[in-house]
Amino acid sequence: MKITHALISIAITLAAAACNSTSNTTNNAGNSSNDTVADGAIAPSSAPAQIEKATILFAGDAMQHDSQLRAARRPDGTYDYSGYFTAVEPYIKGADYAVVNLETTLGGNDYKGYPCFSSPDSYAEELKQAGFDMFLTANNHCLDSRDAGARRTIEVLDKMGVDHIGSYLSAAERANRLPMIKDIKGFKVGFLDYTYGTNGIRPGCDIVVDYIDTTLIKRDIKALRDAGAELLCVNMHWGIEYKQLPVPIQTQLASFLARQGVELIIGGHPHVIQPIELREDNDGTRRLTVYSMGNFISGMKKTDTQGGIMVKAFLSRGKNGKAMVESAEYLPVFVMRPGMKATRNFRLVMAEGEPAALPFLKSATAIFDRYNINVPRCKKIEL
Ligand SMILES: [Zn+2]
């Protein structure tokens, strides 16, 4: 399918209005209406048959550096992340489904930051509490606690009752879990997650990590379509760290995914933001490409790494009932470190209106204003 570069005429004001109208809707986190069936078939939904709007939210890399561990540690040895996401929680919970990249492992003990991350379970639990429904686990740090840590991460996420995708206990477990289709307010959305590598650490005989491999991706996409996915969301851990523009391997892979008909291409890893595009094919298919959302939360201190964005995709149906990505918006977020405004712990806040976030926001805005295609900033959030 050849992509044209025709711009979609989406008025920024309409997107902003959509943002406001959805910010107070109920989150379906853990709700049984988002049913996945092991063989990919969709369970009957109790929702009305004709629901025409839904939103999916994507967040960047959820990191856990040593400075975060030190700040979260209580005298009794437990780790407290309460308040980490409180300021942005309504925006996350306002989405019908929310996805975050868990760029650490839940190794169980001996918690560590860079370079081999292992985080307390309470960190993941706080992400769930903030409203995230799906945790991505295909990234270059998913084997930081080796096979045992990767296994435990999957087991803990299962116990928490959240969806996760990208690494698996075994080939058999992968075959059982995929194709993964979520029923999001009546939209059947298929998910996949791949990483460029795992920092030179290879999985042992059982653990499976989904590496970027176009043959595998083609096969997985076909399985999702065959199982009834109306929209495809492929998450890619790719790119070069600290580069605010995509490198050729990213644009080439994005073109490959576009040729496969993927409607939502969602990227991470560079730790800084990169442009977002919403384009339309000749056949009217709208495709959202998010090259990098930067950090969600981290202990990183360089200006461009101190924040990131959340991206919200608005789904609707055309006149023929065909599911589509109608529009998208982004919301910049910023990490407040201990000591800023007398905060004891790290906290994620909206970047706009926060004086400490100005250098980050200025740099990110320069990129978005110059390179984004049809994806405006969401300006009016009622938190
Ligand atoms: Zn990464």
Image: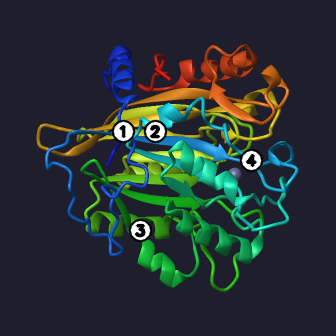
Q: Is mark 1 within 8 Å of ligand 1?
A: no
Helix, strand or loop under label 2: helix
Marks 4 and 1 sit apart, C-alpha to C-alpha, by 26 Å
Residue 40: x and y in percent read 32, 70
Residue at 24% over, 50% down: 186
- Density class for disc 1 (Cα within 10 Å; few <14, some 14-19, many ≥20) is few
Against 33, is 2 above or below?
above
State the mark number for residue 220: 3
Instruction: Inspect the image, locate mark 2, and give the three-letter code of the amino acid beneath it.
Output: Lys
Q: Contact (CB < 8 A) between labels 1 and 2?
A: yes
Q: Earlier in the sequence, mark 4 or mark 1?
A: 1
Residue 29: x and y in percent read 43, 50
Pick out the residue farthest to the front. Answer: 76
Marks 3 and 4 sit apart, C-alpha to C-alpha, by 38 Å
Disc nearest the viewer among 2 and 3? 2
Instruction: Inspect the image, locate mark 4, and give the three-letter code of the amino acid beneath it.
Output: Asp
Residue at 40% over, 37% down: 313
Q: Earlier in the sequence, mark 1 or mark 3?
A: 1
